[in-house]
Image (cartoon, helix red, strand yellow):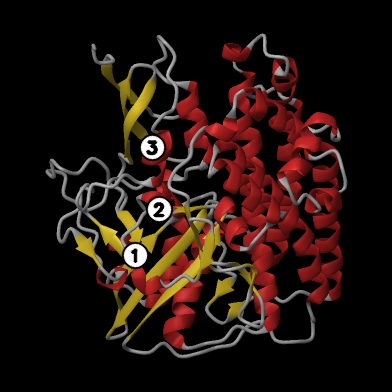
């Protein structure tokens, strides 16, 4: 019996991805047999932070990225709060939740309208029953959905204008809370802004009240929406996903991680902290996180545990390494993160049902992101109503000479952690593990592929495709932010 023909294909750089990305594919016959994900740009923010005053992290870290800078600010503030031993007052938590949620919701909206859906307005899909609708709604620069979404996003960012003074790179988030108090008039304006955004979601994206989206609880509910649900872009996506069999595309390991998102005064979160693996939920222990360097272009040890002891020394002559991205592992295993992980760990019945049925597929990732968009928008109104303008918003604390702490938060793309070590009043070590570091990691010390590398195995490749559409859909379903990956 003759072997299937084998070939290699380099895909990249990817358009509509934040930062540089390259994927090397090994193809056997008509499908991907192995993938190697390369983050080809080294930036070195962790090195920039070394030796500085610890409070400089609030200025430097957000500049890692222009689309998720509030998340980087929040992680830095949490790490600083940890070393300072400060507890944020209730108003500070609520305002922080609003700011981080605004950025995350906007990122979900941008991903769906600008990064993911325009693929289906390509001539490659001409002739599909849904093509003309996809082209009218999502064709680059001309789609009606794109124009509406960008207008809604711009209006939503008034929340960050009022609370943060500017976006990106606000300095409002501090270890002890927020520096901008909200009065009664501000709250009215903020509520009006969030309600306007809610109306956009109901009128355009879902075509139905958010309460109807929030009521989705089973795979059968989703199928009914696809067949006879309200007209909107959500239903259009479900039609496309069914036609292109996205429920069978892009499955990784079935292990998911969430740091917990949107803290409450009782140390809980709107979306719980934990891991979900093999159909079971468990607690998350940051002491079990390690960084592997074997296939990263980094000097030093192959495995660094915990990240407090980590280093970021680039080695451009490293012939074994094929990426500037490190390989984070939890308990020695790769984990996927993102909206799907948050909703799984939080126990949402629809997402758990989809993952039980299909795994972490392209369809389940996108559905989780859109469901979270609805859930978070709904929660934002509650946070605004819970604010007490007369209560404290921020507290002060002293910086110790020696301490270490980790700041754990959730960006739109998943789990974000800042490991800060202070010695003699200066930053002695600063290690960042971003969501795309988890999802787009190279192989680890044992040669185990990262989540995206695994998810690409089995992706179909058509004859003559130099940039396979299936590969692009899988990559975009993770919503990569490569500049955060390599800091």
When the figure is inspected, residue 274 is found, relative to residue 469, above or below; the finding is below
Near-viewer residue (240 or 33) = 33
The residue sitting at 31% across, 87% down in the picture is 402
Q: How far apart are marks 2 and 1 (CA)?
A: 13 Å
Q: How far apart are marks 3 and 1 (CA)?
A: 29 Å
**Sequence-first tag of 3 and 1:** 3
The residue sitting at 40% across, 53% down in the picture is 438
When the figure is inspected, residue 323 is found, relative to residue 422, above or below; the finding is above
The residue labelled by disc 1 is 331
Task: Say whether residue 424 is visible.
Answer: yes
The residue sitting at 56% across, 82% down in the picture is 176
The residue labelled by disc 2 is 438
Label 3 near label 2: C-beta < 8 Å?
no
When the figure is inspected, residue 102 is found, relative to residue 133, above or below; the finding is below
Near-viewer residue (205 or 402) = 205
* 377 relative to 228 in the view: left or right: left
The residue labelled by disc 3 is 20
**Sequence-first tag of 2 and 1:** 1
């Amino acid at each position: 019996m003759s072997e299937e023909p084998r070939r290699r294909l380099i895909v990249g750089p990817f358009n509509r991805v934040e930062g540089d990305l390259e994927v090397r594919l090994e193809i056997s016959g008509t499908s991907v047999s192995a993938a190697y994900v390369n983050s080809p740009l080294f930036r070195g923010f962790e090195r920039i932070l070394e030796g500085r005053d610890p409070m400089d992290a609030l200025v430097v870290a957000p500049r890692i990225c222009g689309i998720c800078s509030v998340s980087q600010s929040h992680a830095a503030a949490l790490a600083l709060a940890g070393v300072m031993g400060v507890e944020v007052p209730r108003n500070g938590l609520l305002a922080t939740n609003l700011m981080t949620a605004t950025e995350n919701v906007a990122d979900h909206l941008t991903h769906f309208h600008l990064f993911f859906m325009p693929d289906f307005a390509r001539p490659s899909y001409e002739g599909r029953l849904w093509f003309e609708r996809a082209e009218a709604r999502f064709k680059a620069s001309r789609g009606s959905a794109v124009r509406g979404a960008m207008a809604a996003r711009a209006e939503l960012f008034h929340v960050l204008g009022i609370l943060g003074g500017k976006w990106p790179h606000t300095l409002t988030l501090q270890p002890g809370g927020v520096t901008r108090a909200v009065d009664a008039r501000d709250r009215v304006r903020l509520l009006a802004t969030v309600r306007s955004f809610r109306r956009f979601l109901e009128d355009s994206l879902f075509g139905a009240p958010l309460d109807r989206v929030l009521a989705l609880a089973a795979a059968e509910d989703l199928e009914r929406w696809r067949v006879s649900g309200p007209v909107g872009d959500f239903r259009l996506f479900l039609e496309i996903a069914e036609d292109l069999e996205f429920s069978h595309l892009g499955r990784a390991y079935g292990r998911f991680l969430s740091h917990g998102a949107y803290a409450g005064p009782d140390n809980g979160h709107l979306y719980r902290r934990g891991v979900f693996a093999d159909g079971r939920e468990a607690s998350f222990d940051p002491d079990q996180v390690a960084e592997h360097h074997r296939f990263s272009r980094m000097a030093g040890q192959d495995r660094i545990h915990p990240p407090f002891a980590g280093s970021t020394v680039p080695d451009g002559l490293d012939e074994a390494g094929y990426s500037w991205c490190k390989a984070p592992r939890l308990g020695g295993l790769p984990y996927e993160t993102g909206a799907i992980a948050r909703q799984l760990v939080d126990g949402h019945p629809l997402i758990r049902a989809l993952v039980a049925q299909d795994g972490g597929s392209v369809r389940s990732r996108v559905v989780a992101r859109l469901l979270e968009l609805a859930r978070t928008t709904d929660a934002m109104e509650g946070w605004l109503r819970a604010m007490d303008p007369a209560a404290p918003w921020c507290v002060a604390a002293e910086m110790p000479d020696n301490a270490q702490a980790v700041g754990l938060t959730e960006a739109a793309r998943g789990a974000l952690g800042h490991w800060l070590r202070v010695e003699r009043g200066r930053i002695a070590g600063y290690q960042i593990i971003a969501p795309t570091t988890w999802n787009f990691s190279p192989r680890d010390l044992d040669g185990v592929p990262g989540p995206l590398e695994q998810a690409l195995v089995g992706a179909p490749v058509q004859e003559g495709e130099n940039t396979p559409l299936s590969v692009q859909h899988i990559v975009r379903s993770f919503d990569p932010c490569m500049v955060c990956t390599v800091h």
